[in-house]
């Protein structure tokens, strides 16, 4: 995609996702997620051309100014919106789909045990809440919502909502009834919609 069309798409995504955004010029000048994405695209191009030092230099300068750390090797789709952004970390082998929203403090990182592909793959139209940690070479499906401060160490299927430490699915669009256990271990079946 043309870089200017990509930038316009990213600006439109920010306008759509942030009710405080007044106009695209304000978003372009003041929003750190837009600056981080512009720098990442430059760094990613250099990384693919094997100019690793320059790619890392650009990503570290961007991190200094925006508080958002995106490794130059990460593959980022269009329309990524990082709300506030401070403390967001996206690792080298992470793949992020289109129209993803990340809140501050989100980590798409590794567990320290893997080589090769060691960071998450995030599908399209995903929202990841503030402080969530998504770790390891796992897959997050399309249309997933992950709650704030969740710790995700296993795959999350598409069209679900997941929360907790460790994360558990509390809503599945294709299965409106789930079984949960109370604090005493008693099981009961409830409608998913009641949990959210």
Image: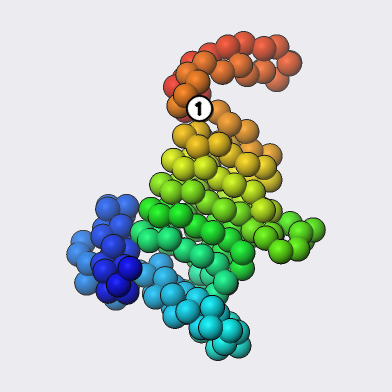
Q: Quadrant of residue 3?
A: bottom left
167 over 94 or under it: above or below: above
Q: Which residue is drawn at 58% across and 39% down?
A: 156
Q: Which residue is drawn at 71% across and 64% down?
A: 116
9 left or right, relative to 91: left
Q: Residue at x 32, y 52 (%)?
A: 17
32 over 160 or under it: above or below: below
188 left or right, relative to 79: right
60 left or right, relative to 142: right
Expressed as whole percent of the image width and height from the top left, the position of residue 158 reads: 50, 37
36 over 191 or under it: above or below: below
39 left or right, relative to 31: right
Dot 1: element: strand
User: Can residue 128 be seen?
Assistant: yes
Expressed as whole percent of the image width and height from the top left, the position of residue 32 reads: 40, 71
Q: What's the image's color scheme?
A: rainbow
Q: Residue at x 67, y 42 (%)?
A: 154
User: Can residue 64 be seen?
Assistant: no
Q: Quadrant of the N terminus?
A: bottom left
The residue where tag 1 is placed is: 172
Expressed as whole percent of the image width and height from the top left, the position of residue 152 reads: 64, 45
Farthest right residue?
113
Q: Nearer the viewer, residue 187 or 13?
A: 13
Expressed as whole percent of the image width and height from the top left, the position of residue 29 reads: 29, 76
- Count of numbered marks: 1
Disc 1 crowd, CA 10 A, few/some/many (<14, 14-19, 20+)? some
């Amino acid at each position: 995609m043309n870089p200017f069309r990509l930038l316009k798409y990213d600006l439109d995504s920010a306008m759509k996702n942030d009710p405080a955004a007044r106009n695209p010029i304000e978003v372009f000048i003041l929003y750190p997620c837009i600056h981080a994405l512009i720098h990442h695209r430059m760094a990613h191009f250099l990384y693919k051309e094997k100019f690793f030092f320059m790619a890392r230099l650009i990503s570290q300068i961007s991190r200094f100014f925006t508080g958002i750390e995106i490794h130059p090797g990460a593959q980022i789709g269009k329309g990524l919106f990082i709300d506030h952004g401070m403390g967001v970390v996206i690792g080298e082998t992470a793949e992020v789909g289109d129209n993803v929203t990340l809140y501050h403090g989100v980590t798409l990182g590794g567990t320290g045990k893997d080589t090769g592909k060691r960071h998450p793959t995030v599908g399209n139209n995903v929202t990841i809440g503030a402080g969530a940690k998504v770790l390891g070479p796992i897959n997050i499906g399309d249309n997933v919502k992950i709650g704030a401060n969740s710790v995700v160490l296993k795959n999350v299927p598409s069209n679900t909502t997941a929360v907790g430490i460790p994360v558990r699915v509390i809503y599945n669009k294709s299965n409106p009834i789930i079984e949960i256990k109370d604090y005493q271990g008693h099981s009961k079946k409830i409608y998913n919609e009641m949990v959210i």
